[in-house]
Image (cartoon, rainbow, N blue to C red):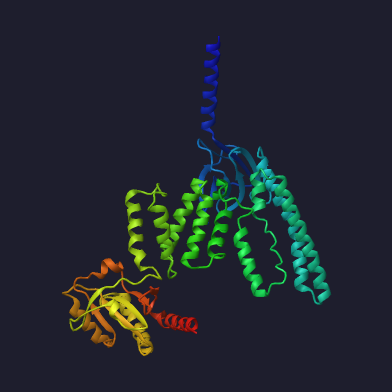
Amino acid sequence: MMKYASFFLLFMIGFFLSGNAQNAYSIKVEIAGYTEKQLFLGYYLGDKQYVRDTVTASPDGSFVFKGKEALPPGMYLVVLAPNNDFFQILVTQKEQTFSVKTTKDKPADNVKFTGSPENNLFLEYINYLSGKRPEAEKLQEEIAKATDDAAKAAATKKFEVLNEDVVKYQSKFAEKNAASFAGAIVRANINDELPKFEGATEDEKQMKAWMYSRKHYFDNFKLSDPRWLRTPFLFQRIDFYVNKLTVQAPDSINVAVDYILEKLRPAPESFKFYLIHFLNNYAASKYVGMDGVYVHIAEKYYATGQADWTEATQLKKIVDNAKKLKPLLIGKIAPDIQLEKRDGSPTSLHKVDAEYTVLYFWRYDCGHCKESTPAMKAFYDKFKDRNVKLVAVCVKNAKEIPDCWKFVDEQNIGDWMHTADPYMRYFATYNVETTPQVYILNRKKEIISKQVPAEQMESVMDKIIEMDKKVKN
């Protein structure tokens, strides 16, 4: 009898698991007045939204989103055709089956849930805020229209009291529902007050406030929680921390990126998403010097096997590209290159004696180079007497080099230091895949700026010289 009982028990477990797998998630949606045939289930990822599921209406007019694999936890959007009106729902690991009712007009205002304590809890919070909004708007209007200081002060005081009440409610809600996703969302969006920094000057207060904000920015936000990935909050928080609370210099950004990624590491999908995001973001950055962040990410994470999802060919491309860029980062000594002057005499980049050297790679048949030539000429005419030399390298092979000099004469730019290299060795050293390319070097031949558009050369050079004067003084 025990053997039969064990078999029966195993059979029932298998039956339950297979039945559950057929409907790992099932969300029924009823929308009064909605006559369209399709409804969409969307989700947040980064700063974008994507469609997860599309369903057609059942005979009774309802819509059922269902699938064999559970939905990853997060905040989803139910999107109505054809105007993309939507309302949000929470999905957790435990709550994958529930129903929703709302109306075609103002669906977010009329939503009701059955079988989802999590969504009802969050709805309770949303309804509270909605109830306070008219009062807040009225007080803001009173403040704006106040004709005397007393009236304005009275309305402002009322508004502050209202705000304090809301903050108290938020804190109490988050504490009471700390184990829930709704509670975590509310807690994450509470802005804790800054210390008053008594006795500090205004400048000191600003610096202390910035430092305090950086240190405590994620106190209420657990980055390792995988539920955050599919919400609008995670990207907003990370983006603000990296781009607003971090000094926009490669070394500082590298520290911030490493900090974020380490916090995300316990959530593998979040770690993967943001590692890819950071790499692509700084690979495409148009800001000078941000390739230093790309190189850091490629070396620290991709070259060490921490991005094991990357296809081998793509991985090699990323790592090789970082190796090419590394010697050309701002702050590095520019690699020396052997060149020939127009008369055939040899020279090299490091032999140029100048306070500032502008290294300019160009071609006579390059459309952008032709457009930049007048601006580069105007720049050099202004700065050639300020100990600035322009080393122009025509990116052509030995056979075509004579045409470089022909173009120089036609454009009347012969007073630049014009060079070429029949062996084209600069291709490997400076990764010259496109032209024009510009590097600005100081006396030590350190790269202090690069890839500056020709029309901006004058303003950039003015700032560099001005900053150097301040440092020397």
The one nearer the camera, 327 or 418, is 327
Image coordinates for residue 387, horizontal then vertical, percent = 36, 87
Please indicate whether residue 276 sits to the left or right of residue 210 in the image.
Answer: left
Does residue 108 appear in this view? no
Closer to the camera in the image, 336 or 238: 336
**Left or right relative to 405: residue 292:** right
Residue 329 location (% of width, % of height): 38, 68
Quarter holding residue 137: bottom right
Observer-nearest of 309 and 325: 325
Relative to 113, does residue 426 appear above or below in the rendering? below
Q: Quadrant of residue 441?
A: bottom left
Residue 250 against residue 28 in the figure, above or below: below
Q: Quadrant of the N terminus?
A: top right
**At 64% from the left edge and 66% from the top edge, which residue is drawn?**
209
Residue occupying the point 43% across, 69% down: 289
The residue at the far front in this view is 473
